[in-house]
Image (cartoon, rainbow, N blue to C red):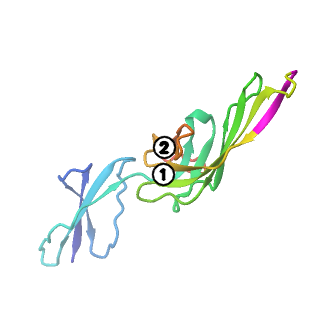
Amino acid sequence: MSEYHIFRVAGLGNSFDLLSTVGSSDSSFTDTTIIWQESFGYKIRAKDQSTNIGDFSDSIFIECYKPSGNWGFPEHDSTTICVQPVIYSPPSTFQLYIGDTLSAMNDTVGVMTLSSESYLDSLDWIGNGWMIYNYTVLEFNEDSTGFDTVKYDKLPEYYSIDLSDPHAGTISFISGRYDTIHLVHTLNDCDGEKFFP
């Protein structure tokens, strides 16, 4: 072979355009013009020393997205978690705080402690884990003359985390006893650096 012709299509269409030509000694090609969250299709064909052009390869389609980096919780102010690149692992344990004061009767302050069970599945970007909910409630004391804070511990709940959409990540609880928690990708890496300048 003398060279390879690389063709690309944006989206999932079938109208491929020539993107680049590379020499036969090049065993890889890097496309530096892809766009975040867009899909692209590629196929190649070879040209030999006699200038014969071969058939196209099978097409391969990719989506420019991986869930690594920082994810924020819009309903929980500045709370973020980092999904590690390469292994796509959320933190082994993280906490979400619910409520912030115990100033009136029946006010509740809670902590959800979420423990990750595994890495994210690299096809669907889904993982699982366990959540333990502990909360404190402001209640009347035993003789109803004052208030006490009473702590409660719930049984562990199994959850699923879905980070397949950077605008609509979710943590949902299998039992349905707790509301779904929403996450949004911050477009920052785990060190806080912007993905895109």
Count of numbered tags: 2
Stretch of the chain drawn in magenta: 145-151
Residue corresponding to mark 2: 169
Above or below, comparing residue 35 to residue 24 in the picture: above
Q: CA distance from mark 2 to mark 1?
A: 10 Å
Please name the amino acid that badge 2 sits on: Gly
Residue corresponding to mark 1: 67
* Marks 2 and 1 close (CB-CB < 8 Å): yes
Return the x and y of residue 33 as percentages of the image width and height: 35, 52
Q: Residue at x 47, y 45 (%)?
A: 196
Of mark 2 and mark 1, the one earlier in the sequence is: 1
**Label annotation for residue 15:** none
> What kind of element bears circle 2?
strand
Based on the displayed image, in which of its 4 quarters is residue 150 positioned? top right
Please name the amino acid that badge 1 sits on: Pro
Based on the displayed image, in which of its 4 quarters is residue 71 positioned? top right
Report the magenta stretch's main SS: strand
Is residue 161 part of the magenta span, yes or no?
no
